[in-house]
Image (cartoon, rainbow, N blue to C red):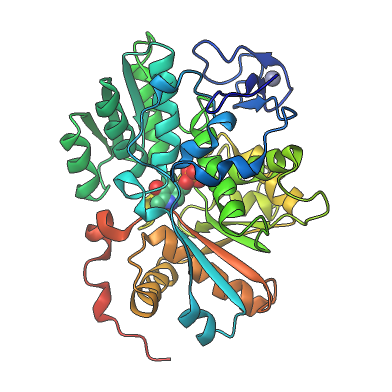
């Protein structure tokens, strides 16, 4: 069979825990069997040739066959994806590193990589005939959902912690969303969402509680491979909250192997989960200091996106870390701010505190010898600093003297 351009190869959904399959053609949340995330699979044996990508649009929709939207008219797009992959020669030189690159997700619509996930989730919501969406958020996901809902003509309700920087709230309002502020972290917001949605009036697009945000996030993996001419980096540093990026990158690498887009003998990158000391459930579980994060208590951090104390996707994240030979590491608030300052001053990049955290963690792992200076290390900067001004005000005065 010939595969027409932009026709999705979506095949089925299955429970990430037990494998039971579910229809990809109706509203789905978590699996009924295990209450765990559902994963989408595709017919990857259709002879899809990566050379076909060459002349396609520079957005994540260039991978349309590997995305779940069935009818292209349901795409809700603001131009997300195909963000630049930049070399960081000045920092590499200062720290004697051979190859240091940064993928700048801050250049996505609404200023973060959340645009990828929400573009897909809202496209599928539209395809499934939803009329209203709701999300608990640490900030960026809410802004992205509000924007894509506005674009799709859907009602949007965003529930965020009261301490979230003001810019996030204002931008949600700019897109016509209803914003509800909660004293607490994202898990408290999630409880509020459950209460508001007890009759199922809204489509709940919480991280990994619907199957398609992950599909949007996985396109980062496709882009990294394509932008590096199908030679993956040795290590990817990822700021981890709910973990969709981590799980999505790994899913993309597996799919590309099946497609034959990556040579079978090419080693895949080691993936590193970077968290904030104030809220580092995955680090604690990874290092065996707790059985899982179901009782973990987190505190707020300047990297709002990392304040996810009890991520539903934790087992999937731990799998990825183990399979890829990666690790998990937490950094302090001061370390991540120092990371933000260095990326700004030496490379002209104004990154979110999450981006500062991965650079801080990179230096730490180099120091410990887990990273080698001759490796290609890719920093996945997930967001722009511009919405975090409330968190970053005044930090520039603290000059570093090394
Ligand atoms: C949401 C967010 C993260 C964490 O992403 P997950 O997919 O939840 O792991 C990291 N950085 C920023 C800027 C975010 O908005
Ligand atoms: Zn199951």
* Residue 33 coordinates in the image, percent (x, y): 66, 15
Looking at the image, which residue is at 67% across and 72% down? 375
Q: Quadrant of residue 20?
A: top right
Q: Quadrant of residue 42?
A: top right
Q: Is 142 situated above or below 272?
A: above
Left or right of residue 288, residue 402 in this image: left
Mark yes or no: residue 306 visible. no
* Residue 156 coordinates in the image, percent (x, y): 27, 24
Q: Is 385 situated above or below 18?
A: below
Q: Is 338 situated above or below 269?
A: below
* Residue 347 coordinates in the image, percent (x, y): 39, 75
Position of the N terminus by quadrant: top right
Looking at the image, which residue is at 38% across and 80% down? 346
Looking at the image, which residue is at 35% across and 54% down? 107
Left or right of residue 170, residue 200 in this image: right
Looking at this view, name the residue that lies furthest to the right. 265
Please tell me which residue lies in front, 146 or 127.
127
Q: How many marks?
A: 0
Please tell me which residue lies in front, 341 or 189.
341
Q: Is 376 situated above or below 305?
A: below
Position of the C terminus by quadrant: bottom left
Mark yes or no: residue 199 visible. yes
Left or right of residue 86, residue 254 in this image: right
Left or right of residue 143, residue 224 in this image: right
* Residue 282 coordinates in the image, percent (x, y): 59, 49
């Amino acid at each position: 069979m010939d595969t027409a351009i932009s026709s999705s190869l979506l095949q089925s959904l299955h429970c990430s825990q037990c494998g039971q399959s579910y229809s990809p053609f109706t509203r789905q949340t978590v699996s009924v069997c295990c209450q765990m995330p559902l994963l989408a699979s595709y017919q990857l044996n259709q002879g899809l040739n990566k050379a076909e990508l060459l002349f396609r649009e520079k957005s994540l929709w260039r991978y349309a066959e590997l995305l779940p939207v069935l009818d292209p008219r349901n795409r809700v797009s603001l131009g997300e994806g195909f963000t630049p992959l930049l070399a960081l020669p000045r920092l590499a030189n200062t720290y004697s590193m051979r190859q240091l690159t940064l993928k700048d997700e801050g250049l996505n619509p609404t200023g973060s990589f959340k645009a990828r996930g929400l573009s897909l989730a809202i496209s599928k919501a539209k395809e499934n005939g939803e009329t209203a969406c709701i999300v608990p958020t640490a900030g960026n996901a809410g802004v992205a959902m509000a924007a894509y809902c506005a674009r799709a003509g859907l009602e949007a309700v965003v529930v965020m912690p009261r301490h979230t920087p003001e810019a996030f709230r204002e931008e949600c309002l700019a897109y016509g969303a209803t914003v509800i502020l909660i004293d607490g972290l994202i898990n408290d917001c999630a409880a509020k969402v459950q209460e508001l949605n007890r009759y199922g009036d809204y489509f709940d697009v919480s991280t990994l509680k619907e199957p398609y945000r992950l599909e949007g996030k996985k396109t980062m993996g496709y882009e990294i491979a394509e932008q590096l001419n199908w030679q993956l980096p040795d290590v990817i540093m990822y700021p981890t909250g709910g973990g969709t990026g981590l799980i999505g990158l790994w899913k993309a690498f597996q799919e590309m192997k099946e497609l034959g887009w990556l040579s079978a003998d090419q080693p895949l990158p080691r993936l590193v989960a970077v968290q904030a000391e104030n809220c580092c459930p995955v680090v604690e579980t990874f290092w065996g200091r707790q059985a899982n994060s179901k009782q973990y208590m987190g505190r707020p951090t300047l990297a709002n996106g990392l304040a996810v104390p009890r991520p539903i996707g934790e087992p999937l994240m731990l799998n990825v870390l183990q399979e890829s030979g990666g690790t998990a590491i937490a950094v302090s608030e001061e370390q991540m701010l120092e990371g933000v300052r260095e990326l700004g001053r030496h490379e002209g990049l104004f990154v979110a505190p999450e981006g500062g955290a991965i650079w801080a963690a990179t230096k730490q792992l180099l120091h410990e010898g887990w990273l080698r200076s001759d490796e290609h290390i890719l920093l996945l900067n997930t967001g722009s600093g511009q919405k975090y001004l409330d968190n970053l005000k005044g930090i520039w005065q603290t000059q570093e003297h090394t």
